[in-house]
Image (spheres, rainbow, N blue to C red):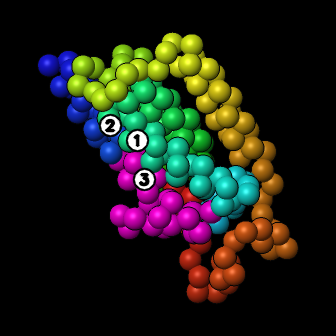
Amino acid sequence: MRNVALLGTRLVLGGYLAVHGAQKLFGAFGGSGLEKTAAGFHRIGLRPGKHMATAAGATELAGGVLTAAGIADPAGPLAIMGAMTVAATTHRAKGPLSSKGGFELPLTNLAAAATLAAVGPGKFRLGPALPRPVAAVALVGGAVLAAGLVARMLTAKPETPADPGNQPESAGQPGSAAPSAR
């Protein structure tokens, strides 16, 4: 029963994160696509927005696929943990509940990924696990990268109209909707 529960958790968490990454990168599944996501990332201080949005989308997509399949464990859950740490930080000002745009969902995803990273994928998985030394380096590297991105967001100066960065030409004009970084 434990292995079935781990498989179910991996499939739900990994599947949703892979879809979320595809929304960012390709506009799939009703997502915003890379340009709008990049503008949102730029606005919250993750600059250059297009590079940061590409990295976030790729991390979510790859982390989701690796988690769902159980391949190269714990690489997938570690990738999700890093992405969700940054995502939770982006929603911090709106409080803990998702009904108000808060960090509830990223924090829940982070907790599920941390649990999978700690207990492993179970026996229903594809491919071998990462060797322990490689997993340790991935953990430390991911933690440093996530901490750097969080620090960048927390210290970013608000964008001014004179600093349009890489936002689409219509951003900020009457009748245009501000993109969401998700």
**Which residue is the site of mark 3?**
20
Distance of mark 1 from mark 3, alpha carbons?
A: 9 Å
Question: What element does badge 2 sit on?
Answer: helix
Q: Which mark is residue 76?
A: none
Question: What element does badge 1 sit on?
Answer: helix
Q: Position of residue 106 (x, y in %)?
A: 46, 41
Q: What is the number of callouts on the image?
A: 3
Tell me which amino acid carries mark 3: His
Q: Assess disc 3: are there few (<14), some (14-19) or many (≥20) residues with their C-alpha within 10 Å of its C-alpha.
A: many
Which residue is pictured at 52% across the width and 52% down the height? 57
Location of residue 175 (image quadrant): bottom right
Q: Position of residue 59 (x, y in %)?
A: 52, 44
Q: Which mark is residue 64?
A: 1
Q: Residue furthest bottom?
A: 174
**Which residue is the site of mark 2?**
68
Using the image as rendered, state which of residue 52 and residue 138 is in the foreground.
138
Q: Position of residue 102 (x, y in %)?
A: 49, 48
Name the chief secondary structure element in magenta.
helix
Using the image as rendered, state which of residue 26 and residue 166 is in the foreground.
26
Cβ–Cβ under 8 Å for marks 1 and 3: yes
Distance of mark 3 from mark 2, alpha carbons?
A: 14 Å
Tell me which amino acid carries mark 2: Ala
Tell me if 155 is positioned left or right of 181 in this view.
right
